[in-house]
Image (tube, helix red, strand yellow):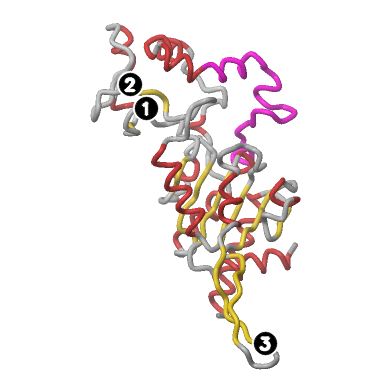
Amino acid sequence: MKELIQRAAQDLVSSKYAIALTGAGMSTESGIPDFRGPSGIWTKDPEAEKRAYLSYEKFKEDPKEYWEERLSRPSSMLGDLGKMEPNPGHHALTKLQKMNILRWIITQNIDNLHRKAGSKNVLEYHGNAFRLRCVSCNSRYDPEEYDLKKLKEERKLPPYCKECKGAVKSDVVYFGEPIPSDVAHQSLEEAWRCDLMLICGTSAVVYPFANLPIIARQKRVEKEGKTDTGLFFVEKIPGVIIIEVNAEPTPLTGEGISDYLIQGKTGEILPKIVEEVEKTRSTG
């Protein structure tokens, strides 16, 4: 593993535009439960999963009823996310950003922990549990910008967008709901632009997020070469290095999408990679 960590550090230092993709594996290391694991929320409560599948349709059909139900059950299935703290893996990615190595973090997680750790350029693919979003224009709001309790008492739900007057919902992306267009488009651009993709704590089976490494793998760049006889030639080679840091192999591992896997906990491996990056830079 030490050799792979050193290799990852060297690849990061050599990269010109690195990004990270992160998933639930990072959140669980901060004590946030997953959904489908042996002790997952939906494993223990199948009815909660059924409700989750209906949330977006309920919002579309009756935004008022959606909000009344939401405000009557304000607690999150994930527990009190506001009390959760970033773990060493989150802080390691923030350090890579501050070193100007990591340009963007694209995360499936809704827990706000990347931002809480100090990361700036974060694309929250499935939304943020601490924000509201207009489904018409994608404007996002702090919940405190609306007096939701008063709106409920005065029977003025749902809250409406201050920009376009569209109905506002939780920023979290529900089943059947399209990924917000601004996030979807920029995520595709970053996947195509990067020359290194660091994939951390994701099973890579939830689409369309899982398409991002596949899209990156399709990128090719031209490299000049020279034959034994002295003739020059140009060949197309992969234009991105894809590194996995995951507890278990994923489809990306088995299908050869990733270049290599560093197997283990992100909270343990990512800080070690950062240490090696610092050593590499100091001796380079």
Residue under numbered circle 1: 135
Identify the mark at residue 167; answer none if there is no mark: 2
The first of marks 3 and 2 along the sequence is: 2
Evaluate if marks 1 and 2 touch, with contact meaning CB atoms under 8 Å apart: yes
Crowding near pointer 2: few (<14 within 10 Å), some, many (20+)?
Answer: many
Residue occupying image coordinates x 56% and y 22%: 77
**Which element is circle 3 on?**
loop
Residue occupying image coordinates x 68% and y 27%: 40
- Callout 2 amino acid: Ala
The first of marks 1 and 2 along the sequence is: 1
Q: Position of residue 204 (x, y in %)?
A: 65, 43
Residue occupying image coordinates x 62% and y 35%: 31
Q: Split into 4 quadrants, where in the image is the N terminus? A: bottom right
Name the image quarter holding residue 150.
top left
Q: Range of the magenta residues?
A: 27-54
Residue under numbered circle 3: 227
Q: Is residue 10 above or below residue 230?
A: above
